[in-house]
Image (cartoon, rainbow, N blue to C red):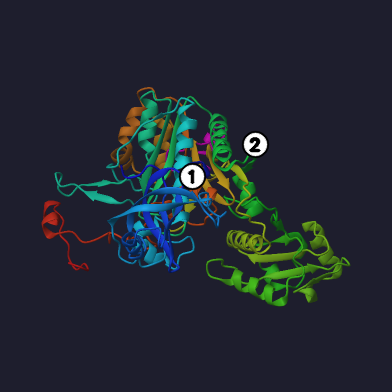
Amino acid sequence: MFRTHTCGELRLDNVGEEVILTGWVQRIRDKGGMLWIDLRDRYGITQLSFEEGVTPASLFEQARSLGREYVVKAVGRVVERESKNDKIPTGDVELRVLKLEVLNPAKLPPFMIEDDTDGGDDLRMRYRYLDLRRNPVRRNLELRHRMMRETRNYLDNRGFIEVETPYLIKSTPEGARDFVVPSRMNAGEFYALPQSPQTFKQLLMVGGFDKYFQIVKCFRDEDLRADRQPEFTQIDCEMSFVSQEDILNAFEGFIKHLFERVKGIHIEKLPRMTYADAMKFYGSDKPDTRFDMRFVELNPLVKDKGFKVFDEAELVLGVCAEGAASFTRKQLDELTDFVKRPQVGATGLVYARVNEDGSIKSSVDKFYTAEDLQAWAAAFNAKPGDLLLILAGNADRTRKALNELRLEMGTRLGLRDKNVFSPLWVVDFPLLEWDEETQRYHAMHHPFTSPKPEDIDLIDDRPGQIRANAYDMVINGVEVGGGSIRIHDRRLQEQMFRLLGFSKAEAEAQFGFLMSAFEYGAPPHGGIAFGFDRLCSLFGGSDSIRDYIAFPKNNSGRDVMIDAPAPIADEQLDELHIKMKNLPNR
């Protein structure tokens, strides 16, 4: 028997018992006549004790020779500790060791296996198997496990069936770049790894599986950041004979279930916000509603006063930061530099303080009277002590920049508490968005999204005004899920492909199998997919999904532990009918 108990299990009730523990040596404390070892496994830490004159000399010296991360087996008797440790659950007891066996020695690890480690990200990713021994990483993966278990429980209890869909599929031109896989048996042809199981789950609806889900790996060959990985996990769901309302109700219940069971938080009914209002008041289709600070448009109040920046701007708008009038000139200069950053894109910042006596001091006083400034304050419902922050310029860029400034102010004012959650639905997205570079429409969600029934008449002459039967779930400014009611009629799907610039032949070659399926009694259907990694990081209070993936890639899409991607042998290339020229490492 390797062990009778785990290292997190023993309590005062076990005093006097002879037990066997196995684990890793966390640390050794040698006080000459006394020696203690902290033995660790995934369940906790138990202190092992050795005493000169009581412990046999050979056993004492054996214990003294151990190193950090040695794998050992200890047989001993549980005793009550004289000096208790209230910071760990096993802190009332220790194991007086009678026998010790080294199961495997270990090299000195390149970083400390501690909660607060001295290892940087790159080093820990290279030795990820050591990083996994640390409590924070283990707790993250345990959270992921609980969320996966509760997801399956909720959906299984409501009649959903989990169905696996293929990983080797056909490449499609829409969306992000595909990862492609060459076929050995079909020279010059390629599979693609799925960006989502979209068409397959729709085919399952045609096949009569009216409630489907899958916790599934998806793949996108796109630039990476904290909330993106080349491979990621979705909670993918689809339902038949449903309206948008049915889906919103079902998956509002799902997210409330997760918060209740995993976080112990009760969430009330999720509010709904139209895409138009989200862009108007927050400059983003994924607004962080933990705090207010909504946009206020100022064009009628600031134009034609001689201030060229406002006079020539397409849009002037701002936010009111409550209680921030005390910001120093240095802090305001920092905010000005922030909005001028290329990734934010504003040309400058105008501010106005509402003083305690109700008077207003602005950075553009010479262009505006006291009455003008009071009108500004009234538009913002500003109170003494508030700070008005105003941007101007092209409408789209200004809204985007003010969104970034609003979030920055929310952070600086402590309004973005990771322990506070504000979920909502964003609905009524545009069906299409115009791309100036390609001079054609692109689907805002994907080509299978249904138009709002009341907007279908716009499809021929005003396609840009069609609203989609689509919805996103947003939590704390993060899009955690999105979906739509799908097109289930071949004629409408063909019209959609035409709007997106597909020729009839292209549409048939790419999606003929789906349109053909629609001719055999496709039911009305719709669904949603949640970013599982994002949900885990949100529940865990982290900005990076990498913290919740056992073996993540770095920001260059590399697995530095196994050194992938990597070149393959020329013989393999020949089998795949691939010729490689002028490439590195060849």
Vertical order, 472 against 389 (above or below): above
What x and y, as percent, mark residue 116?
A: 49, 63
Q: Which mark is residue 15?
A: 1
SS for dot 2: loop
Residue with the mark numbered 2: 269
What x and y, as percent, mark residue 517?
A: 34, 28
**Does the magenta-highlighted stretch encompass residue 5?**
no
Query: Looking at this view, is 109 or 579 the one in front?
Result: 109
* Predominant secondary structure, magenta span: loop
SS for dot 1: loop
Q: Residues within 10 Å of mark 1 (few under 14, many from 20)?
A: some
- Residue at the image point whose x is 38% and y is 33% from the top: 201
Are the residues flagged by discs 1 and 2 in contact, CB closer than 8 Å? no
Q: Which mark is residue 226?
A: none
Amino acid type of the residue tagged 1 in the rendering: Val
Q: Which residues are magenta?
A: 445-462
